[in-house]
Image (tube, helix red, strand yellow):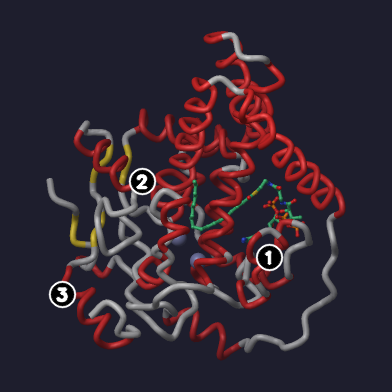
Amino acid sequence: MAPRNAAENNDYEGDHLGLDQVEAIIADPPTQKRPPMKIVWRNVVLFAVLHLAAVYSLFLLPQAQYKTLLWMAFTYWLAGMGITAGAHRLWSHRSYKAKWPLRAFLAFCNCLSFQNSILEWSRDHRAHHKFSETDADPHNAKRGFFFAHVGWLLVRKHPDVKEKGKVLDLSDLKNDPIVMFQDTHYKKLVLLFCFLMPTYVPVYFWGESAFIAFYVAAILRFTLVLNATWLVNSAAHMWGQRPYDEHINPSENYYVAFCATGEGFHNYHHVFPHDYSTSEYGWHLNLTTVFIDTMHFLGLAYDRRKIPMDVIMKRKLRTGDGSHR
Ligand code: ST9
Ligand code: ZN
Ligand code: ZN
């Protein structure tokens, strides 16, 4: 079955700001002064150590067996699918539906990425879209590249995130037993799948040293996936073309799309957040769409939502920057 027309049943958001957002801003305009930031030193230290260890891992790459390098690439892709096809396109946006074996697989992949549980990730991401680039957006890109990239994980959240975030409806996530199981057992699952499993496989199956396997397949791969994801919040909110809406900051950034398995078409995504391809196009620089389409072929994914061409064209002509006409 072809992808479903997401414009049917009024179930897609074609505008950057919904009516409820405009009303919220009028009722409570953003304040210019922000409360002082409360730095979470534990996170600062942990992320600094992680990145130093990742740099150290780069020097170990020449000593790693080629199978370990392939394994690292494969686990990068698995962790990526847990975020892009899982937490993002399936659970945050409901841009397609998945049968339980696929949801279980994506929840497992999501543990490899260690980016907070699906429930927490999706809550923050829904806030990011609903209150985009205001203080209620957890990684508000108006606060600069560093804040949007990683700084937001090093400080307590702005009170608006918690206050305005209360209106978010998370009932669909709370009714998904796979999401709730992952949330309940999150720490153990992360230890097992983000760190132990990626280290154990190269040691057991092709005799790699545990030291190299840990640094390359766990630490370096984890740090690279984190930074590829963070680039969507930072670089893709700053640099690139804006063919769908020139009035918003999210941009079409092909470098980010490449690193983030298809998630760099961010101007399109903020205008049409319910499109399962997060892009006007299908498989172009978009391994995640290839994956979802393959799952659809296997009968595990269905009801993929796609914005019709005429809606996209009208929007480009009305609000785009002219770069894709
Ligand atoms: C990580 C996440 O890296 C990365 C996400 C990136 C998203 C990118 C999206 C782009 C599109 C997709 C691209 C994919 C590309 C993939 C490429 C792959 C190759 N709404 O959070 P707390 C309330 S994580 C409503 O503790 P603090 C709530 O009541 C890295 N309410 O705030 C909550 O209580 P509870 C690993 C909200 O204390 C309470 O506030 N993880 C919301 O200010 C407290 O929440 C870490 O390092 C909301 N949105 O602390 C952990 N938010 O939860 C880092 C909060 O009980 N995090 N509330 O319901 C922390 O340590 C803390 O969260 C903190 C803030 C210090 C940052
Ligand atoms: Zn965004
Ligand atoms: Zn999104």
Label whose residue precedes the other's in the sequence (1 or 3): 1
Along the line of sight, which residue is nearer the eye, 166 or 300? Answer: 300
- The residue drawn where x is 44% and y is 86% is 247
Residue 62 place in picture, x, y as percent: 61, 28
Q: Residue at x 27, y 81 (%)?
A: 316
Q: Disc 1, disc 3: CB below 8 Å?
A: no
What residue is at 69 percent from the left and 34 percent from the top?
A: 59
Give the mark count: 3
- With respect to residue 168, does 172 lie above or below? above
Look at the numbered disc 1 and give the secondary structure of its residue.
Answer: helix
Q: Callout 3: few (<14), some (14-19), or many (20+) C-alpha neighbours within 10 Å?
A: few
Distance from the alpha carbon under mark 1 to that under mark 3? 38 Å
Amino acid at the residue labelled 3:
Asp
Q: Is mark 1 within 8 Å of ligand 1?
A: yes
Find disc 1 in the rendering and name its residue: 162
Q: Amino acid type of disc 2?
A: Thr
Q: Is residue 42 above or below residue 102?
A: below
* Disc 2: CA contacts within 10 A as few (<14), some (14-19) or many (>=20): many
Q: Earlier in the sequence, mark 2 or mark 3?
A: 2
Label 3 beta carbon less than 8 Å to ligand 3: no
Percent position of residue 109, x then y: 49, 33
The residue at which mark 3 appears reads as 310
Left-right relation of 290 to 308:
right
